[in-house]
Image (cartoon, helix red, strand yellow):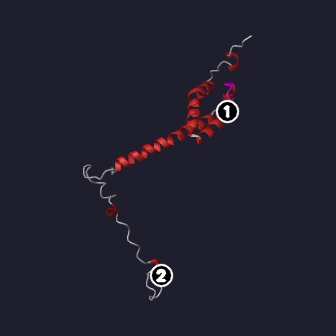
């Protein structure tokens, strides 16, 4: 076979410009495979083959999967940015280590279930304390609030 790919060895080879404009191979007809892709989209539900859905339901399914996949990441990023924007003096007065919480939340973004748990713990337990300190409410010292056994 010659380099032109035409199959006949006696024909002269194609010039580079002719190779560029050679017809593309015929695509596979999906109807020959037993299912249709584009033709069933506009058909009524009764006429549609099993497993074929409409454009709107395809979009909603894609959006739902994207939402479920992106929600843990969005929650962790929100918690990390919130922890980063709080001033260091508020963390100090609340007796909470800012660097540790930021490191834990950042690590949690890569570990989905752990990240959601850490982010929720920060947002529901730690963030209100830091926010209260920023607004002037000083919580009792954590060491004073624990009773000391004799």
Q: Which mark is residue 4?
A: 2
For label 1, the crowd category at 10 Å Cα-Cα, with few meaning under 14, some 14 to 19 and many 20 or more, is some
Give 122 or 27, whichever is nearer the viewer.
27
104 with respect to 35 (left or right): right
- Kindly give the residue lying farthest to the top in the view shown: 150
Which badge, 2 or 1, comes first in the chain's sequence? 2
Quick one: 52 or 98, which is closer to the camera? 52
Residue at the image point whose x is 63% and y is 22% from the top: 136
Residue located at (57% from left, 38% from top): 76
Residue 25, quarter of picture: bottom left
Front-most of residues 46 and 123: 46
Q: Are marks 2 and 1 in contact (CB under 8 Å)?
A: no
- 147 within the magenta span: no
Q: Is residue 78 visible?
A: no
User: Magenta stretch: residue 98 in it?
Assistant: yes
- Quarter of the image containing the C terminus? top right
Q: Position of residue 71 (x, y in %)?
A: 50, 40
Magenta-colored span: 93-99
Q: Residue under circle 1?
A: 98
SS class, disc 2: loop
Answer whether residue 86 is visible to the viewer in this image: yes
Q: Is residue 40 above or below residue 26?
A: above
Looking at this view, name the residue that lies furthest to the right: 150
> Which label sits in the foreground, 2 or 1?
2
The CA distance from mark 2 to mark 1 is 68 Å
> Pointer 2: residues within 10 angstroms few (<14), some, or many (20+)?
some
Q: In the figure, is residue 122 to the left or right of 35?
A: right
Which residue: 45% across, 81% down?
18
């Amino acid at each position: 076979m010659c380099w032109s790919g035409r199959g006949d060895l006696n024909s002269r080879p194609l010039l580079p410009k002719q190779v560029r404009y050679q017809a593309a191979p015929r695509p596979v007809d999906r109807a020959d495979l037993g299912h249709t892709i584009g033709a069933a989209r506009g058909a009524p539900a009764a006429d549609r083959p099993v497993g074929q859905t409409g454009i709107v339901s395809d979009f909603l399914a894609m959006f739902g999967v994207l939402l479920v996949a992106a929600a843990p990441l969005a929650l962790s990023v929100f918690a990390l940015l919130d922890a980063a924007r709080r001033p260091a003096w508020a963390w100090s007065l609340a007796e909470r280590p800012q660097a540790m919480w930021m490191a834990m939340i950042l690590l949690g973004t890569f570990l989905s279930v752990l990240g959601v748990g850490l982010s929720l713990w920060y947002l529901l337990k730690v963030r209100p304390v830091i926010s209260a300190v920023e607004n002037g409410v000083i919580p009792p010292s954590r060491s004073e609030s624990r009773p000391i056994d004799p």
